[in-house]
Image (cartoon, grey):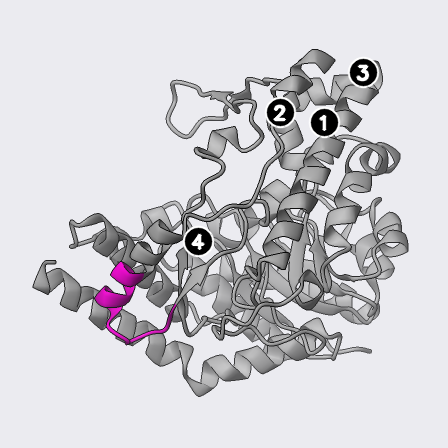
Amino acid sequence: MDTDERNLVRDLARQYIEFAESDENKKRMGLWSNHNSLKYTRPLIRVMQFAEHEISEINNLQCTEPYMRNLEYFFRKEIYKISLNDDTIFKPWYSVRACFEYPTTYDLRWGAKISVIRPEMSGGAFIHDPPIKTEEDLNKLIKPYHSIDEQKSKEKHEQISEILDGIIPVITDRTPNYYISNITDISTDLGYLLGLGQMMWHMMDNPELVKNTAEFMSNGVLSVQDTAEKAGDLTTAVQWNQSMTYANELPEPSADGIPVLRYDLWTGCAAQEAAGISPAMWEEFIFNYQKPIISKFGLVSYGCCEDLTRFIPILKRDLKNLRRISVTPWANTRSCAEQIGSDYVMSWRPSPTDMVINYKPERVKAIIREVFKIAAEHRNIIDITLKDVETISGNLDAVPGFVKCAREVIDEGCWLFQ
């Protein structure tokens, strides 16, 4: 192990853990816990994405050894995020992903090989190359299972622990591969398996193919999560809701390693691939297969980039553990605010084009101010999440500037109930 590289990584880890254990970070934990428990707090700010590939202080890495380089990147990225001064909570531990025996590769997560056709242009849009075209193709699917290679996982944990030398607690993330949103939402992988456009044709011409595929996936996710839960592989340290996984009703996230049930945890779900279909078709072909999965968890956040304006009544009717609802740039903000009221958290996701691509402080503040006034009118408990920032067009001041603008509008008090 290169001594200089090791010392560099340890120094970065010290900088990170200093903030993660700070009073400011603990204050944020309390704020999010109350906020997500529907207690009226000021609007909270989360920068979820910020075109990290364009930021030199994150990407000018000095380490060459793969493990060291990954650690250096992680800590540089997190330290940069701390500098943004939003309300993100930084976990006072480092997670090492366990080594899994299935799937052997990510593109075989359902047995049938998932592939896409990419364009010649760098960064261009790909199209799906669906492996499931007919009912007979369903035979290609393999029921997933949860199995950890204990020896490899132990060696990986020990290697990272040796590098970090007790500076920060190191845990092993044993949560199953079929646990994060873009697999458990069913919707994403339906698009990969059936083809996004063809899936919508199938809904009319061959509805049973869509339903049988979705049912197979739903049952597979449930089986894997059941196995992981019974094995004690779920803890509060690893959760997902596209925000901060804190709430007074649930155990506080911790590195204690104590096994918990899904009922003790947050989850997130979405159906971006359903953006072009009706609420009735979304419910029939996607939501009905999501519900058995997300109903097992303590609290759920629903929505990513899709417009949920017309879907909210069904979500409210059927999800007793629903707590957060996303409101995207394509949604009818006023209608969503009215439907959400103070019964759920309104997770507002402004357009990154408005916030950072064409960054103009007064315009940014005017947009935030307008939405906060709508939220006040409908007594919403609102937070603001900046996501899907693919580029900052070279303007390093744009994302910190967005946070500064949001804080200035919050200080104005226009979000307060009238």
Tags 2 and 1 touching, CB below 8 Å: yes
Q: Which residue is mark 1?
A: 213
Pointer 2 or 1: first along the chain: 2
Question: In the image, what residue occupies the spot 82% across and 21% down?
Answer: 208
Where residue 206 is drawn, which disc sits there? 3
Examine the rendered structure and indicate whether residue 35 appears above or below residue 209: below
Pointer 1 or 4: first along the chain: 4
- Regarding residue 55, the answer to whether it shows in the image is yes
**Secondary element at image label 2:** loop
Pointer 3 or 1: first along the chain: 3
How far apart are labels 1 and 4 at the CA level?
35 Å
Disc 2 residue type?
Leu
Disc 1 residue type?
Thr
Examine the rendered structure and indicate whether residue 391 appears above or below residue 94: above
Residue closest to the far left: 3
How far apart are labels 3 and 4 at the CA level?
41 Å
Q: Which residue is mark 2?
A: 141
